[in-house]
Image (tube, grey):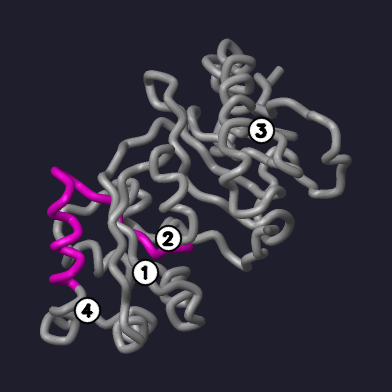
Amino acid sequence: MKKKETTHYGISSWYSTLADYTFPTTFVKLKDTELDMLANGITEESEVYNIVNRISKAQHGFSGNTFVFADTIVPTDTERFAFKKGAVYSATSAWRNLTESTKIRTAAKNREFECICVRPFRNMTNYREFRLFIFEGKLALMSQYWQTRHYHRLDIKKDFYWAEAEELVDEISWLLPVQTIVLDIYFTSKDQIILIDFNKWGKPTDPLLVQSWDMDWNNEHGIKIIPLSE
């Protein structure tokens, strides 16, 4: 049976089939009233006690800092993300960080998610994060995710990273939400691939170094990295 197309690819929609390939994650479902509180940026302790308590229980499954985000949106537009990459220790800090994100508040208002996700925090190295463009179940192109600068290490390992990513896609293609999709991944220091999240094919998903969606995706285009400036 053909898989049903979906408008978004929140972690909760694919975690049950791909949990072995990603971070351990706990989900906290929000009531409508809690989504309203999030949309309105409410942090008053007496009002948010119940949801903060549930987030705290979810955090107990992990030691140290956690990374807390909405099912379909990461609070990258907050001060905590800029300075601490989103790491939070207490549930109160986690909730406050979510309310400080305009992206999260807007998504909550529009009911674009129902769950808050809790993961162990991992301080990820920028050059090991990539976006994969999977067309009809095959890896068509791979882009350096963070476009901050050229990394000499990528020049050395880019062919290896491409081969590993291609092998991953071949292995999990039958488990993908849809066969044409964008996947963000991270290589650990031991070269293990961790799935970060899925994105819809085409706009508004950022094609990064590809720059345009208007290209022949039937062909294999390899890995794109920022070149060394001359």
Tag 3–tag 4 contact (CB < 8 Å): no
Mark 2–mark 3 Cα distance, whole angstroms, equals: 25 Å
Q: Position of residue 187 (x, y in %)?
A: 46, 28
Identify the residue at horizontal 50%, vertical 28% (top origin).
127
Placement of the C terminus among the 4 image quadrants? top right
* Magenta extent: 52-74
What number is the disc on residue 115?
Answer: 1
Identify the residue at horizontal 66%, vertical 33% (top origin).
142
Is residue 91 depicted above or below 15 in this figure? below
Q: Where is residue 78 in the image (x, y as percent from the top left)?
A: 37, 60
Question: Pointer 4: what residue?
Answer: 43
Relative horizontal placement of residue 25, taking residue 74 as reference (left or right): left
Tag 2–tag 1 contact (CB < 8 Å): yes
Q: Which amino acid does label 3 sit on?
A: Met
Upstream in the sequence, badge 2 or badge 3?
Answer: 2
Tag 4–tag 2 contact (CB < 8 Å): no
Question: Pointer 3: what residue?
Answer: 142
Question: Pointer 2: what residue?
Answer: 12
Mark 3 or 4: the one toward you: 3
Is residue 56 covered in magenta? yes
User: Which structural element holds mark 2?
Assistant: helix
Mark 2–mark 1 Cα distance, whole angstroms, equals: 8 Å
Relative horizontal placement of residue 211, taking residue 88 as reference (left or right): right
Q: Which corner quadrant of the image does residue 208 belong to? A: top right
Q: What residue type is labelled 4?
A: Thr
Q: Where is residue 85 in the image (x, y as percent from the top left)?
A: 34, 46
